[in-house]
Image (cartoon, coloured by chain):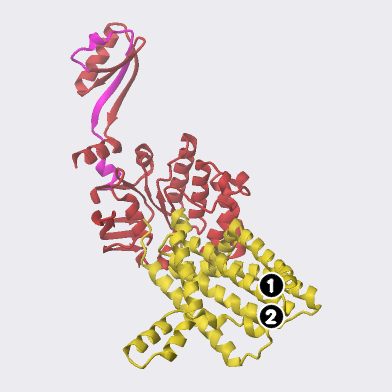
Amino acid sequence: MKIGAIAGITFKEAKRDRILYLLFFFAALGIVASRVLAVLTVGDRIKIIKDVGLASISVFGVLMAILIGTGLVYKEIDKKTIFTLLAKPLHRAEFILGKFLGLVLTLFVMTLAMTLIFLAIVYAHTLKVEGSLLVAVGYIFLELVLITAVAILFSSFSTPILSSLFALAFYLIGHLSWGLELIIKKMRPGAGKALVRALYVFLPDLENFNLKTEVVHGLPIPPAIYLSAFLYGVCYTAFILGLAVLIFRRRDFI
Amino acid sequence: MADAIRIDDLRKNFRLGFIPKTRQILKGITFSVREGEIFGYLGPNGAGKTTTIKCLLGLIRPDAGTIEIFGRPHLSPRSRQPLGFLPENPYFYDYLTAREFLAFTADLFGLARKDKEERIARLLELVGIARAADLPLRKFSRGMLQRAGLAQALVNDPKLVVLDEPLGGMDPLGRKEIRDIIVRFKDEGKTVFFTTHILQDIEMICDRVAIIVGGRIVKEGALRDLVSEKVLFTEVTVSGLAAADFQGLGESVSAQGDRILLKVFEEAKVDEVLDLVRGRKGRLVSVSPRTETLEDIFVETVTRI
C-alpha cells in the first residue's frame, strides 16, 4: 500500500512533465512519418513502416525513461519533499520501489498509446491487426523497465544531467556489447580472452530484448529466446534496483 | 513515566567542501523526553538542532550514539508509526490539493479509507484550512503551508509530535492558534518535542527544555528549575515628574511625553520611588517586577560559551 501510494504520486508527477508529451509527440510523428518514408523507399513498404514504428517506440520510450527517471529521486531531495516522506514509517527500499513502479506505470501508458498509433498505421496499410507486433513491443517495454531502474539508480546519488549521461551510456553500451561476443570468438585462448569474456558478462546486453527483426520479417523465434530474454530483463532490473536501494539506504539527507 | 525519546551520546560529523574537511556537528548529545510532556529544544542557528531532529527521524545516520523512540531503535520504520513530524520549512508536492496531500500521507501510515476521510476532514478543520482544502498547495501562503504541514503531522493521530520551528512564518494570531493546538496535544496525552526561536512562546507552554550550543547540550531541565522566581528589577512607569527627580533611585530607560520608564534594581528603592511620586503629586502608571525569563537564560548561556 505504501509502495502503491509512492507509485501513485510518482505517476501523477510524471504525467505533469512536459518532456513526456514532447517526446510522445515526436514518437507519434515518427510512427506516422514511417508511412511517408515507405512511399519513398524501394522495397517492402510494410516492413519499413514496422521497422520505423518499432524503432520510434523504442528510442522515444528510452528517452522518456532516462529524462524523467533521472530527475525522480533527485527532485525529491532537491525540493526537500523527501524529509516529510522518510519521516513516515517507510523503508527507503519502499520509496525506491514506489518511484520505480510509478515511472514504469507512466511508461506503460505511453508505450500503450504509441503502440495504438503504430497498430492503427499498420492497419491502415494492411487492413490487418498484427498481434505479433505486440511481442516486439513487449520486449521493448521490458528494456524500458530496465532503463528506468538504471535511471533511478543514478538519480539516487547524482544530478539529473550526469545521471542522464550515465544512463544514456548504459543504453549505448548495452546495444553495442554484443560486438564483444564476436571478438571473443576470434580471440586466442588466454588472459585477454578471459578478460573480454568477463567484461561481456558484466556489461548489459540490451540486444537480448531486440526481437524487431524477427517480428518484422516473420522469422520464427524459439521459446528459449523469449524465456531467456525475459529472465535476463527481470534479473538485471532486480540487480540494478537492489544496487539503488543499497546506495540510497546509506545516504544522509542534510 | 516512560521516555518518548531517549538520545544517548549522539555524535555526527560532516565532511564538507571541495577538499573535504570534517566538521563536528553533534558532540555527544544526551537527553530524554518523557511521555506526555512538551519539550522545547533551543539553540542558536547552527547549534545542531535540526541535525538532532534529522538523526531522530532517520534522515541522517549518526556516527555514534543511540536513539530510541518509545523504546524502539529509531532506524526501524515501526518506531516512526506513532510519530508526526513537521519540518522547518514544509516542502510538499505543490500540485496536490491539501486534501489529496493528506490522503497521500494517510496512505503512508496505512490508514483505512473510512478513517482516512473522516480524519482528514477533522484535521483540515482543526488547523483552519478547511476552506482551502481543494486548492493546490502552490496557491497557499507560507502560514497556510505551515498549517497544512501540521495537519500532515497529525494524520496518524501520533503519540509523539516533532515540530521543527512550528511558529516560523506565522502571524501573531496564527502563533497563538498553533500554541493552543500544542497545549491541546498535551491535554490529549501526546508528547511534543519542538524547536523554536520564539522564546516567549516556549516559556508559556513548555514543561522542560534543553539548550544546545555548538553541538553540546549546555542546559537541560524543568522550566521551573531553570528559571528562578527572583526579581531581577522592577519597571516603574510614572508621569508628571522629571527623570532628574529619580537620580540615584533607578535608571531612566525611556521618556515619552511626560511619562518616564524607570528600571529599579533594588527592591527597597521601589518603595522610595513610590513615596517620591506620592509626595510630589505625580501619577503612578504601572509597577511591574521583572523575573528571570527563559530568554535571559538563553542569552546568558549562549553568550557565555
Q: Which residue is mark 2?
A: A133
Residue closer to the observer: B212 or B234? B212
Q: From this viewpoint, is residue B1 visible?
A: no
User: Which one is in front, B225 or A65?
Assistant: A65
* Residue reaching furthest to the right: A127
Q: On the picture, is A240 further left or further right than B220?
A: right
Q: Residue B78 appears at what percent x and percent y?
A: 42, 67
Disc nearer the start of the sequence (2/1)? 1
The magenta segment is B221-250
Residue at x-position 32% and y-position 55%: B52
Binning the other alpha carbons within 10 Å of mark 2 as few (below 14), some (14 to 19) or many (20 upward) gives many
As drawn, the chain in yellow is: A
- Quadrant showing the N terminus of chain B: bottom left
Q: Are marks 2 and 1 on the same chain?
A: yes
The reply to whether callout 2 and callout 1 are in contact (CB within 8 Å) is yes
* Drawing shade for chain B: red
Q: What element does badge 1 sit on? A: helix
Q: Chain of mark 2?
A: A
The amino acid marked with disc number 1 is Thr
Q: Position of residue A163 (x, y in %)?
A: 45, 64
Q: In the image, is A1 to the left or to the right of B197?
A: right
* Residue linked to disc 1: A115
- Please state which amino acid type lies under the numbered disc 2: Leu
